[in-house]
């Protein structure tokens, strides 16, 4: 009777969300899921027992005979795929290295599903590392919803990477990737990637989570606390009476709607600071107050709301009513409605990491692209947005272009011989160096180069359009390109193909400036293999300047003149097949002082030494 009742209740709860999802996505379908979970935590053994009930809706046109679950904690065992990869890659993550191979029995992580039923019928399971392969007793038909009932147990690993217990700063629990998480199924099929330390991809849905733990622990993370008047610890409303029981444990009840993951953290010594913004969003900061944190975390309360306002204004309104910044983990890692960051930092570092992880709430948390296939659509766009935010809220007088660091990192990668296409699966980059520079730096330059090609105002409007059209819909590389094409009226598939799928580089040069029958002839050369439109600035001896614009023929149009640039006097299309082109100015060479390619320095040209001609 309980299963039937639960099925009906969850079907009704999900129906509104599912209907919105179907209406929003048109011909694109997505699966949807609702988790109801409860765990009982043993803080002395660092283990927990859990129950999980899942309502899973198959919106695909396919009949599913198997499903897959991630068991992330199994990565933290000697000889796991994460361990092997960390010990054998040429440039290991210093936070991991050989640490997993040295974990003892009470330090390893594990997650084991003890039993699972689908619609009351037992399934067949095989645990393969960090993936549970489940053969179903009956297929899941298109447009149907099924119920999975699961019992599981787990041990929290000593903190190595992202999740775990007792991190370097003394935080007891950083509980990320802590439950059996159903792998996502989309138009490309199942994405049951083993966990070796890279990125995540999940199905949007609702999480109803109950965590029973010793009553002196303070918790925070994803979701809205449902029983604040029982818990206290700063969560209760002003004037509300906290009604605690005499039991040795408390059960924290959280609910998180329309998210694709759930993280929580816990420590008996957490200080909980709460900021209520005027727009109704509540910011939570949880940290262990001491001489290394007190001053800077107190000041952080000023910057987190400012960053929230910046991102909402420039990339779309944050759709939830709270966000939590929590000390924990091993650096900075984003999760829906929350982040884990290490806290022993200077103010600049603390703000910088917070800003970066908060920006993920847009590109990873809500847009939710497949980070394994398109890590640059999350890490890169997040880097771009957080660079702009830091310049806006932290620097009193921002100097230089906010993306300058991304240019330097990309140029170093392009010249290193290590570069791989951005389309490489995140887990399969040959080096961490190549992955990091491609996902973060070259990914950020995707948007920076788009600003150069179509104009920054148009690019910025396109990003708001992107949010409006694709939030909660998990866009791919073609989707973002099409949004920008529609905003600009230009054809841009060529840029995506070059920038994402190849390692061809941009390199242009001024190779000749000479007098030609009383006129000035300028010769430009494309030395790199990637074509781009060119902005050329001519400065005359009398001080006035003019812009010459060379759009690529295959753009099928041109960008509008940008504010703050010299007036455009000449436009000349440049076919990509022609490695050189000539421009004839109806002015004598004697009146020309200098000529420069890309005066804004937004073009990702890997050799700028030949981009300028100056009269001697």
Image: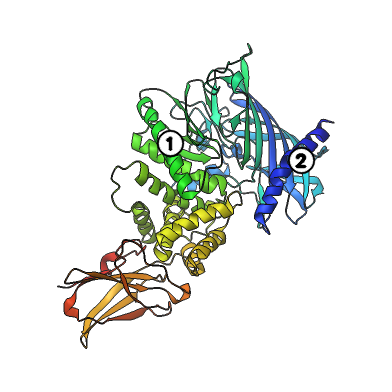
Distance from the alpha carbon under mark 1 to that under mark 2: 37 Å
Q: Which mark is residue 121?
A: none
Residue 180 shows in this picture: no
Query: How crowded is the residue under tag 2: few (<14 C-alpha within 10 Å), some, or many (20+)?
Result: some
- Quadrant of the image occupied by residue 71: top right
Q: Is 251 located above or below residue 406 in the figure?
A: above
Does residue 358 appear left or right of residue 137 in this picture? Answer: left
Label 2 element class = helix
- Quarter of the image that includes the C terminus: bottom left
Does residue 545 appear left or right of residue 439 in this picture? Answer: left
Q: Which residue is mark 1?
A: 304
- Residue 143, percent from left and from top: 77, 51
Q: Which residue is mark 2?
A: 11
Q: Residue at x 77, y 35 (%)?
A: 9
- Quadrant of the image occupied by residue 417: bottom left
Q: Residue at x 48, y 61 (%)?
A: 421
- Quarter of the image that includes the N terminus: top right
Query: How crowded is the residue under tag 1: few (<14 C-alpha within 10 Å), some, or many (20+)?
Result: many
Label 1 element class = helix
Of residues 598 and 500, the one drawn nearer to the viewer in this rendering: 598
């Amino acid at each position: 009777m309980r299963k039937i009742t639960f099925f009906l209740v969850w079907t009704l709860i999900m129906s509104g969300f599912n209907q919105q999802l179907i209406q929003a996505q048109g011909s694109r379908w997505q699966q949807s899921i609702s988790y109801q979970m409860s765990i009982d935590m043993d803080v002395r053994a660092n283990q927990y027992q859990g129950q999980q009930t899942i309502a899973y809706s198959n919106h695909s046109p396919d009949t599913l005979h198997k499903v897959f679950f991630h068991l992330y904690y199994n990565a933290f065992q000697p000889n796991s795929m994460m361990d092997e990869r960390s010990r054998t890659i040429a440039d290991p993550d210093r936070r991991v290295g050989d640490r997993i191979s040295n974990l003892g029995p009470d330090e390893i992580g594990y997650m084991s599903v003890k039993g699972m039923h689908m619609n009351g019928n037992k399934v067949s399971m095989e645990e393969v590392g960090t993936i549970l392969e489940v053969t179903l007793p009956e297929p899941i038909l298109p447009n149907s919803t099924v119920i999975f009932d699961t019992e599981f147990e787990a041990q929290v690993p000593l903190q190595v990477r992202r999740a775990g217990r007792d991190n370097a700063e003394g935080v007891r629990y950083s509980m990320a990737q802590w439950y059996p998480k159903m792998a996502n199924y989309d138009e490309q099929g199942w994405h049951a990637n083993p966990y070796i330390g890279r990125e995540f991809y999940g199905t949007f849905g609702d999480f109803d989570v109950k965590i029973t733990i010793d009553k002196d622990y303070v918790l925070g993370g994803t979701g809205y606390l449902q029983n604040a008047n029982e818990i206290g610890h700063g969560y209760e409303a002003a004037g509300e009476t906290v009604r605690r029981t005499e039991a040795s444990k408390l059960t924290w009840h959280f609910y998180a709607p329309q998210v694709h993951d759930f993280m929580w953290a816990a420590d008996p010594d957490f200080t909980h600071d709460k900021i209520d913004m005027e727009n109704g969003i509540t910011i939570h900061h949880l940290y262990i107050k001491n001489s290394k944190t007190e001053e800077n975390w107190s000041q952080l309360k000023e910057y987190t709301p400012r960053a929230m306002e910046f991102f909402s204004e420039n990339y779309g309104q944050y759709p939830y009513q709270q966000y939590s910044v929590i000390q924990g983990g091993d650096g900075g890692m984003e999760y829906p409605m929350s982040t884990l960051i290490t806290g022993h930092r200077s103010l600049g570092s603390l703000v910088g990491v917070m800003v970066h992880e908060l920006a993920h709430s847009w590109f990873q948390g809500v847009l939710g692209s497949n980070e394994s296939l398109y890590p640059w659509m999350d890490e890169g766009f997040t880097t771009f947005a957080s660079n702009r935010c830091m310049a806006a809220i932290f620097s009193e007088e921002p100097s230089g272009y906010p993306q300058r660091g991304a240019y330097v990192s990309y140029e170093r990668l392009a010249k290193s011989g290590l570069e791989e296409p951005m389309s490489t699966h995140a887990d399969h980059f040959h080096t961490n160096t190549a992955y990091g520079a491609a996902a973060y730096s070259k990914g950020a330059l995707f948007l920076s180069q788009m600003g150069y090609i179509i104009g920054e105002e148009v690019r910025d409007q396109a990003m708001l359009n992107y949010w409006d059209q694709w939030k909660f819909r998990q866009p791919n590389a073609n989707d973002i390109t099409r949004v920008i094409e529609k905003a600009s009226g230009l054809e841009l598939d060529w840029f995506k193909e070059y920038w994402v799928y190849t390692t061809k580089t941009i390199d242009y040069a001024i190779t000749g400036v000479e007098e030609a029958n009383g006129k000035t002839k300028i010769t430009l050369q494309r030395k790199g293999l990637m074509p781009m439109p060119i902005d050329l600035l001519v400065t005359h001896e009398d001080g006035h300047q003019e812009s010459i614009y060379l759009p690529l023929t295959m753009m099928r149009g041109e960008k509008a003149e940008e504010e703050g640039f010299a007036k455009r006097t000449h436009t000349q299309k440049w076919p990509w097949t022609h490695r050189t082109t000539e421009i004839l100015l109806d002015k004598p060479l004697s009146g020309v002082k200098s000529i420069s390619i890309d005066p804004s320095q937004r073009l990702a040209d890997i050799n700028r030494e030949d981009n300028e001609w100056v009269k001697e």
